[in-house]
Image (tube, helix red, strand yellow):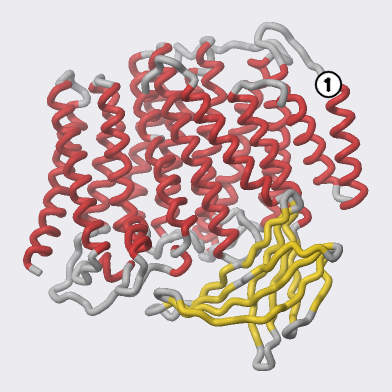
């Protein structure tokens, strides 16, 4: 026992050593002491990694003298989820953030040796180290070891939730480096090398954010039992906000390369970093209600102070551009003109999402009560922006830099019009007509090219088509079944085959079996579940899903049961859902392709 206590004291000492290293490093970043800065970086990074190893060891060994281990693990929790408890709680997630930042910094230091570029990096380390050490100490101990812990939140005991947070953190944390590079470039002047390096880190963060958001949607689809994947929840929006500005920054890069929009580029890169910190604040402060958020915490005061400081520095840095800002007017219908227009569209979209996200906070300040925006607010405020962005992107890729061109391929448009009219006749939904028309035309128009940008936009169009179909056609109905009973659902026949019980490692489960047929052809069985987790006594619903590619999914959730064996289900048919999962993967792979094809380029 004494050995473990000493280890946790060492963990706290290592965190404080890291604070001192980051503080000295921040001051030295304004000098030319390269060797000393590198020594401080190495000291800080190794200290953080070792302190994370100590915490992870405590989690895996179930040392219930540590408060964090008690709160997020239990004896019967599977080993895999003891590992994911590393980022499952407040203190652990901040430690994991520091761990990811440390690994990134090792690669960053190996390639970039300019002292001033580390200002933002050291400031980020210092903030998160102070917050972790003094507001959410992961090594807080009890005098005696407890017999067992509370266990990990059952909603987090899902393989997608095990992968989603690390990917999201890789995206969030990665925004530190384009912010650092663009901040230095804003002070010392942009050159092609700094622009390319900034783009590399923008792309890397954007790829991870894309995948992180995708897997978060997949987790919500499987675990929350409401048949959807995106609810415009404040914490969902928290990851979407930096994704918007990173996407805009990546498009702005092409304008910066030819000498314009440098102020835009700097502001978008820094906004990505600022919004990543803001998103972390939303998740951890408890100021908004969300199924994804951590419990209410005083940790928010630390974030507000740091965000305020970042905002002041950001505003004053912009004064650097006054008098040197280059304005270039692009001829209408050229690629530069379309990209310039899309810049404004991205910003309008950003502020629409920000307004909806912070509306509960604003209304609480004014009325004392948190009021939330409805789904319709986001639908009608963001859908036109997305449509305009997609159209401008298609036209930009089809245009030239030096000559105004506005052309529409008649064959592609004709095919798209016929298909979308068929959808209109079947669904009588104008949104589906517009969505399919634009998505299909864009895919046909861009399919001929093999460039990463074209492939990425095809992925966006595929995703858009999936969203349009699921958002407008996905519906759920409550249906009750007696054992052996068959009922019609759309063109499907659902037969309730019965139910059974089983025991998991840390839960008791019951699952029902439902067979699905279409036109007398057997498609397979669906097995929705309910689980009672120990020791928390929490109940979760595990959706039963039968993919019917390319039509969509049949999605079933157990709602309840009666003593006579009758089961009540919420049954959904989600057409086009596979497109929602496939599209972002194509986008991310295209982004990775774009990075790898730059021969001889090093980050």
Establish if 396 lies above or below 371: above
Q: Quadrant of the N terminus?
A: bottom left
Image quarter of residue 478? bottom right
Camera-side residue: 244 or 286? Answer: 244
Residue 541 x %, y %: 56, 72
Q: Is residue 473 left or right of residue 115?
A: right
Q: Is residue 119 left or right of residue 280?
A: left
Camera-side residue: 50 or 139? Answer: 50
Q: Count the labels in the image.
A: 1
Q: Quadrant of the C terminus?
A: top left
Residue found at the very far front of the displayed protein = 521
Query: Which residue lies under the disc numbered 1?
Result: 409
Establish if 27 lies above or below 284: above
**Element at label 1:** loop
Q: Residue at x 17, y 18 (%)?
A: 32
Q: Residue at x 24, y 20 (%)?
A: 113
Residue 32 visible in the displayed image:
yes
Q: Is residue 165 left or right of residue 3?
A: right
Q: Residue at x 58, y 61 (%)?
A: 222
Residue 471 visible in the displayed image:
no
Residue 304 x %, y %: 36, 48
Residue 530 x %, y %: 55, 76
Image quarter of residue 542? bottom right
Estimate how packed mark 1 is, as few (under 14), some (14 to 19) or many (20 or more) residues with alpha carbons within 10 Å: few
Camera-side residue: 487 or 197? Answer: 487
Residue found at the very far right of the displayed protein = 425
Image quarter of residue 553? bottom right
Establish if 90 lies above or below 102: below
Q: Is residue 502 left or right of residue 229?
A: left
Q: Residue at x 53, y 30 (%)?
A: 591
């Amino acid at each position: 026992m004494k050995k473990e206590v000493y280890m946790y004291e060492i963990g706290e000492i290592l965190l404080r050593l890291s604070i001192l290293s980051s503080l000295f490093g921040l001051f030295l970043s304004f000098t030319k002491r390269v060797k000393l800065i590198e020594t401080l970086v190495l000291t800080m990074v190794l200290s953080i990694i070792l302190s994370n190893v100590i915490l992870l060891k405590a989690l895996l060994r179930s040392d219930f003298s540590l408060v964090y281990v008690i709160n997020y693990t239990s004896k019967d929790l599977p080993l895999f989820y003891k590992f994911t408890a590393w980022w499952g709680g407040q203190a652990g997630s901040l430690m994991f953030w520091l761990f990811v930042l440390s690994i990134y910094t090792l690669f960053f230091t190996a390639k970039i040796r300019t002292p001033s570029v580390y200002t933002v990096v050291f400031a980020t380390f210092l903030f998160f180290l102070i917050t972790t050490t003094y507001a959410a100490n992961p090594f807080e101990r009890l005098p005696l070891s407890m017999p067992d812990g509370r266990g990990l939140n059952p909603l987090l005991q899902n393989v997608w939730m095990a992968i989603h947070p690390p990917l999201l953190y890789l995206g969030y944390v990665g925004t530190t480096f384009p912010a650092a590079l663009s901040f230095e470039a804003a002070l010392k002047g942009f050159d092609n090398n700094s622009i390319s390096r900034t783009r590399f880190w923008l792309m890397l963060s954007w790829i991870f954010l894309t995948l992180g958001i995708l897997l978060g949607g997949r987790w919500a689809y499987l675990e929350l039992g409401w048949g959807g994947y995106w609810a415009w929840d404040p914490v969902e929006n928290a990851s979407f906000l930096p994704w918007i500005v990173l996407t805009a920054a990546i498009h702005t890069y092409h304008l910066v390369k030819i000498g314009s929009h440098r102020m835009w580029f700097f502001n978008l890169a820094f906004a990505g970093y600022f919004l990543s910190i803001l998103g972390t604040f939303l998740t951890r402060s408890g100021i908004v209600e969300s199924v994804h958020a951590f419990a209410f915490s005083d940790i928010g005061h630390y974030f507000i102070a740091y965000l305020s400081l970042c905002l002041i520095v950001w505003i004053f840095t912009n004064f650097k551009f006054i008098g040197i800002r280059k304005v270039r007017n692009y001829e209408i219908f050229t690629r530069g003109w379309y990209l310039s227009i899309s810049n404004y569209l991205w910003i309008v979209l950003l502020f629409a999402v920000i307004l909806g996200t912070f509306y509960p906070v604003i209304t609480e300040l004014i009325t004392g009560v948190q009021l939330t925006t409805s789904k319709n607010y986001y639908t009608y405020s963001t859908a036109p922006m997305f449509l305009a962005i997609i159209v401008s992107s298609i036209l930009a890729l089809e245009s030239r830099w030096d000559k105004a061109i506005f052309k529409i391929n008649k064959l592609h448009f004709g095919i798209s019009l016929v298909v979308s009219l068929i959808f209109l006749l079947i669904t009588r939904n104008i949104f589906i007509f517009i969505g399919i028309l634009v998505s299909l035309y864009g895919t046909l128009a861009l399919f001929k090219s093999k460039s990463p940008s074209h492939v990425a936009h095809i992925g966006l169009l595929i995703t858009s088509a999936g969203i349009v179909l699921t958002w407008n056609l996905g519906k759920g109905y409550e249906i009750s079944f007696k054992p052996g009973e068959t009922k019609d659902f759309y063109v499907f026949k659902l037969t309730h085959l019965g139910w059974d019980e089983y025991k998991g490692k840390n839960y008791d489960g019951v699952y029902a079996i439902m067979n699905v047929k279409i036109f007398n052809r057997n498609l397979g069985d669906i097995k929705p579940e309910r689980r009672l987790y120990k020791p928390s006594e929490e109940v979760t619903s595990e959706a039963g899903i039968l993919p019917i590619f390319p039509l969509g999914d049949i999605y079933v959730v157990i709602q309840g049961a009666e003593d006579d064996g009758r089961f009540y289900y919420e049954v959904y048919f989600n057409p086009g859902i596979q497109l929602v999962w496939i599209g972002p993967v194509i986008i991310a792979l295209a982004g990775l392709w774009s990075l790898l094809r730059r021969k001889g380029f090093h980050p």
